[in-house]
Image: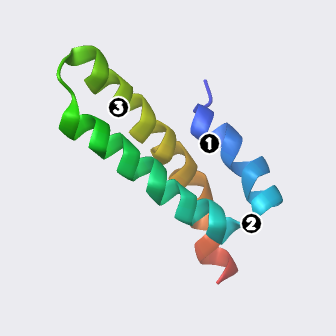
Amino acid sequence: MHHPGAVLAGPFADTYGRRPLYLANSLIFAVGWVVFGMAPNSPILLLGRIITGLGTGIAGVVTPMYVHAV
């Protein structure tokens, strides 16, 4: 099974560019960690995990493309 963040990263990188996607991914991680920090219960922790997992999938695809392009 493919990770949703990894599946979305390729088309978004082609459309918007690697660097903008990499910078936007920082916001995804930040939102996930804010959700973790403010979570009052387990379902909200799960939401934070889903958000940061999406960011991890994106980073796993975009980082090698961005580093290789530089």
* Residue ID for mark 3: 49
Name the foreground residue: 15 vs 70.
Answer: 15
Nearest to N terminus: mark 3 or mark 1 = 1
* Residue ID for mark 1: 6
At 40% from the left and 40% from the top, the residue drawn is: 52
At 29% from the left and 44% from the top, the residue drawn is: 34
Q: Secondary structure at mark 3?
A: helix
Disc 1 marks a residue whose amino acid type is Ala
Quadrant position of the C terminus in the picture? bottom right
- Alpha-carbon span between mark 2 and mark 3: 26 Å
Nearest to N terminus: mark 2 or mark 3 = 2
Name the foreground residue: 68 vs 39.
Answer: 39
At 59% from the left and 65% from the top, the residue drawn is: 64
* Residue ID for mark 2: 17
Residue 27: image location, x then y, percent: 46, 55
Residue 11: image location, x then y, percent: 79, 48
In the picture, measured across the screen, residue 26 lies left or right of residue 70, that is left
In the picture, measured across the screen, residue 46 lies left or right of residue 56, that is left
Residue 63: image location, x then y, percent: 55, 64
Q: Secondary structure at mark 1?
A: helix
Residue 29: image location, x then y, percent: 40, 50
In the picture, measured across the screen, residue 56 lies left or right of residue 40, that is right
Tell whether label 1 touches label 2 (CB within 8 Å): no
| Crowd around label 3: few <14 · some 14–19 · many ≥20 (10 Å) | some
At 67% from the left and 48% from the top, the residue drawn is: 9
Tell whether label 3 touches label 2 (CB within 8 Å): no
